């Protein structure tokens, strides 16, 4: 037993008697107050309290006073317990485990108070996955769902620190995800836009073509590079009026310099099909010591020379003829293509792989007929269209052209455009410098759905947009937090898949939201001890815990 005389905030000194012991369950040393003798601001009275304390300590040493064994866990009467709140344990157990495994626990290393700021970053990421909301509301919900008291001021301070070290943090995160790989067989690249519910433009937020149809509001452009499974490996943010094609080389070049990879194979959609982008990739292969680059990019076939277009239409005609012959000779043992056929052409030392599909032909025709059906409802006998109809039904503008002879704004149906479009039904083309078989080239290209899924999860599940921040540093930090949250979800999904459990990210989130702990406290006056009573694991959550080798105790525990 010993005496402690700390000074309180009100200036008074309190005299207490404490006993030191080790906890039986953990062995950690701790103290417990056994008696508070009194408190005062008067030095004489404080001296009197000390004398009383010394007398009690002497009685304890001589055996006149005995104390219980505090190392033994005190039994609690269930009828003394008072019900409290409940908080989520599944996110802390599973995503907290993944967060630590990916070395995200110590991302912030510069400046003061990094331990606390790293904890704030972690729970901001977990909150983004649990219930995406404003940072102000997050500070409230963190206490409700995770039993964490984190103020809005601390969250915003953390975001400013993230913004100050953004490039270093991104490099560290993506280096961890790359795991030392130097030859990347498949990288997926795509671009999207993120809008703000605002019309105030600045150097970052600006008006441009919005992929979400929010053309009347300012936006930013987000370009992402991911692996074949949709795990992000790099991203860059551009002003809202940046053209898609101008983002490609900047992102690839930044990725190569930061990660020092030897070889990459990039897959991108039609928006990246420009001579500048392809020439940039070709130049990497021409210079000695550079990263070697392969690519598969969706080709805009209508831009090709007339000679090549003629070859493509001849190929389509041949395939259609073969299909008709096969239909007429069902019993003949002949090997004729019925659904997917390929041909390879050369253009500027690159391969143009052409594919024709009957299913795609039917789909293209149906889309055009849908537009023509709308067009027929707004045209007169002379194929004229009112300008107001073009503005209301923007889709029909595809087959409308402005009459140059008219002073007033007037449009007419472009029949030549309709006939020209029909020639391309069922045809799709890819541009590549790879020598693999056409079937392999198209199979790799179809992996782009993974990066489209990345955008969908970030935009909808994690509510990356609309963005409510207006300071550039907070915008950058917000997107970084969203990407960390997405990385946790995607990594968990892949780990479960490797263990034979095919759960979608939505299924994982719903399963872990049901893993909760109920808080109760000892209702006796002299006790402020709280206890956690874990809820029984749902079946899907059981599989997740087992697959990731994480133990879950059903027994109550002291908090």
Image: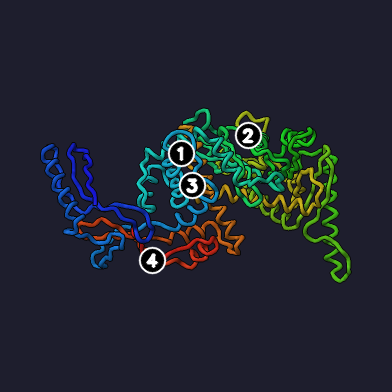
Cα distance, mark 1 to mark 2?
21 Å
Crowdedness near tag 2: few (<14), some (14–19) or many (≥20) residues, C-alpha within 10 Å: some
Do residues under tags 2 and 4 come within 8 Å of each other at their CB atoms?
no
Quarter the C terminus occupies: bottom left
Residue placed most toward the observer, 245 or 197: 245
Secondary structure, mark 4, is loop
Q: Residue 403 shows which numbered tag?
A: none
Q: Is residue 110 above or below residue 532?
A: above
Q: Residue furthest bottom?
A: 331
Cα distance, mark 3 to mark 4?
36 Å
Q: Which comes before the other along the chain, label 3 or label 4?
A: 3
Q: Which comes before the other along the chain, label 1 or label 2?
A: 1
Q: Badge 1 is on which residue?
A: 197
Q: Badge 3 is on which residue?
A: 463
> What colour scheme has been applied to the protein in the rendered image?
rainbow
Q: Badge 2 is on which residue?
A: 243
Name the residue at 80% across, 34% down: 286
Residue 156, image x and y in percent?
A: 41, 37
Residue 171: in sight, yes or no? yes
Q: Nearer the viewer, mark 3 or mark 4?
A: 4
Q: Which comes before the other along the chain, label 3 or label 1?
A: 1
Secondary structure, mark 1, is loop
Secondary structure, mark 2, is loop
Q: Residue 555 shows which numbered tag?
A: 4
Place residue 519 in its image quadrant. bottom left
């Amino acid at each position: 037993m010993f005496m402690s005389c700390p000074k309180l905030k009100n200036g008074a000194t309190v005299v207490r008697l404490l006993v030191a012991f080790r906890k039986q369950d953990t062995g950690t040393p701790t103290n417990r107050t056994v008696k508070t003798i009194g408190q005062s601001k008067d030095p004489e009275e404080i001296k009197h309290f000390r004398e009383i304390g010394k007398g009690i300590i002497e009685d304890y040493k001589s055996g006149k006073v005995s104390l219980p064994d505090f190392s033994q866990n005190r039994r609690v009467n269930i009828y003394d317990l008072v019900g409290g709140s409940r908080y989520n344990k599944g996110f802390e157990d599973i995503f907290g485990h993944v967060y630590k495994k990916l070395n995200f626990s110590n991302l912030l290393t510069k400046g003061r108070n990094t331990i606390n700021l790293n904890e704030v970053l972690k729970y901001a990421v977990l909150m983004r996955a649990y219930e995406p909301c404003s940072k102000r509301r997050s500070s409230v919900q963190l206490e409700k769902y995770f039993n964490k008291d984190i103020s809005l001021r601390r969250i915003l301070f953390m975001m400013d620190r993230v913004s100050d070290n953004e490039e270093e943090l991104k490099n560290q995160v993506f280096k961890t995800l790359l795991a030392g790989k130097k030859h990347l067989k498949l990288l997926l690249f795509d671009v999207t836009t993120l809008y703000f519910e605002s019309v105030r433009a600045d150097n970052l937020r600006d008006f441009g073509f919005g992929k979400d149809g929010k053309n009347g509001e300012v936006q930013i452009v987000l370009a992402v590079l991911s692996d074949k499974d949709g795990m992000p490996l790099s991203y860059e943010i551009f002003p809202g009026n940046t053209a898609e094609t101008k983002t490609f080389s900047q992102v690839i070049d930044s990725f190569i310099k930061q990660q020092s990879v030897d070889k990459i194979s990039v897959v991108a959609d039609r928006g990246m099909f420009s001579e500048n982008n392809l020439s940039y990739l070709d130049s990497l292969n021409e210079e000695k010591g550079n990263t070697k680059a392969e690519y598969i990019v969706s080709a805009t076939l209508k831009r090709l020379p007339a000679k090549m277009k003629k070859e493509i239409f001849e190929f389509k005609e041949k395939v259609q003829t073969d299909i008709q012959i096969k239909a007429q000779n069902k019993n003949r043992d002949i090997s004729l293509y019925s659904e997917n056929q390929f041909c390879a052409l050369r253009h500027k030392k690159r391969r143009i792989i052409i594919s024709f599909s009957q299913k795609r032909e039917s789909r293209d025709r149906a889309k055009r007929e849908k537009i023509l059906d709308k067009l027929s409802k707004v045209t007169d006998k002379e194929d004229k269209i009112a300008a107001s109809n073009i503005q209301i039904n923007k889709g029909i503008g595809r087959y409308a052209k402005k009459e140059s002879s008219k002073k007033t704004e007037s449009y007419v149906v472009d029949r030549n455009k309709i006939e020209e479009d029909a020639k391309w039904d069922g045809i799709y083309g890819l541009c590549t410098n790879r020598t693999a078989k056409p079937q392999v080239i198209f199979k790799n290209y179809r992996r782009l759905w993974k990066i489209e899924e990345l955008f969908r999860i970030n935009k909808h599940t994690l509510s990356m947009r609309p963005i409510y921040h207006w300071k550039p540093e907070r915008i950058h930090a917000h997107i970084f937090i969203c990407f960390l949250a997405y990385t946790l979800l995607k990594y968990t999904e892949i780990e479960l898949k490797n263990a034979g459990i095919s759960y979608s990210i939505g299924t994982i989130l719903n399963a872990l939201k049901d893993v909760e702990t109920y808080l109760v406290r000892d209702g006796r006056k002299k006790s402020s001890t709280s206890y956690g009573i874990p809820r029984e694991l749902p079946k899907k959550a059981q599989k997740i815990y087992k697959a990731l080798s994480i133990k879950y105790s059903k027994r109550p525990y002291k908090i």
